[in-house]
Amino acid sequence: MKPNTTPRPVLVPGAIYWADGGRQICVRCAGQSALYTGRDLSGQKVARVTVEDVRAWPEDLGSLQCASGCTSLTAVAGPDGWPLERGDVW
Ligand SMILES: [Zn+2]
């Protein structure tokens, strides 16, 4: 294993996170700060959206997606237990 000297994003591509004010962010629109620290601008740690979150999401709001609409989740859990991304919104 190579030593890990370069900063690595802590947010996972294809995942959505709850940021400040209940806003949803994904890797693409999180911004560098949140991407590498896992914290939003107010310093709060962002929480990854779970399958339960997607299931609890009100249907009339459409699919659970990030604030910019570039990532959208399904209520289907992937092999790692996190919700799978909807591929048809890109
Ligand atoms: Zn996004």
Image: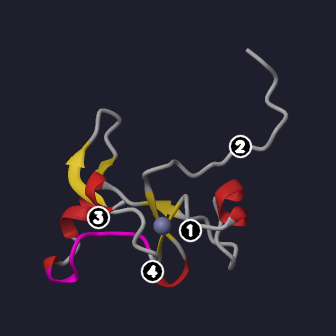
Residue 19, numbered label: none
Find the residue positioned furthest to the left: 59
In the image, the residue with mark 3 has its CB under 8 Å from the nearest atom of ligand 1: no
Q: What distance separates the C-alpha of mark 3 from that of mark 4?
A: 12 Å
- Asked if residue 62 lies in the magenta stretch, the reply is yes
From the viewer's perspective, tell me whether residue 86 is left or right of residue 90: left
Task: Give the structural element (helix, strand or loop) at label 3.
Answer: helix
Task: Give the structural element (helix, strand or loop) at label 4.
Answer: helix
Mark 1 residue type: Cys
- Label 3, residues with CA under 10 Å away: few <14, some 14-19, many ≥20: few
In the image, the residue with mark 2 has its CB under 8 Å from the nearest atom of ligand 1: no
Residue at point 25%, 63% (across, down): 54
From the viewer's perspective, tell me whether residue 5 is left or right of residue 23: right
Task: Give the structural element (helix, strand or loop) at label 1.
Answer: loop
Say which label, 1 or 4, has the lower sequence index: 4
Q: What distance separates the C-alpha of mark 1 from that of mark 2?
A: 16 Å
Residue that badge 4 annotates: 22
Say which label, 3 or 1, has the lower sequence index: 1
Mark 4 residue type: Gly
Tally the numbered discs. Answer: 4
- Label 1, residues with CA under 10 Å away: few <14, some 14-19, many ≥20: some
In the image, the residue with mark 1 has its CB under 8 Å from the nearest atom of ligand 1: yes
Report x, y in % for residue 15: 43, 54
Question: Quadrant where the N terminus lies?
Answer: top right
Image quarter for residue 52?
Answer: bottom left
Residue that badge 2 annotates: 8
What type of secondary structure mainly makes up the magenta span? loop
Residue 29, numbered label: 1
Q: Nearer the viewer, mark 2 or mark 4?
A: 2
Q: Nearer the viewer, mark 2 or mark 3?
A: 2
Write the start and end of the magenta stretch as one range: 60-66
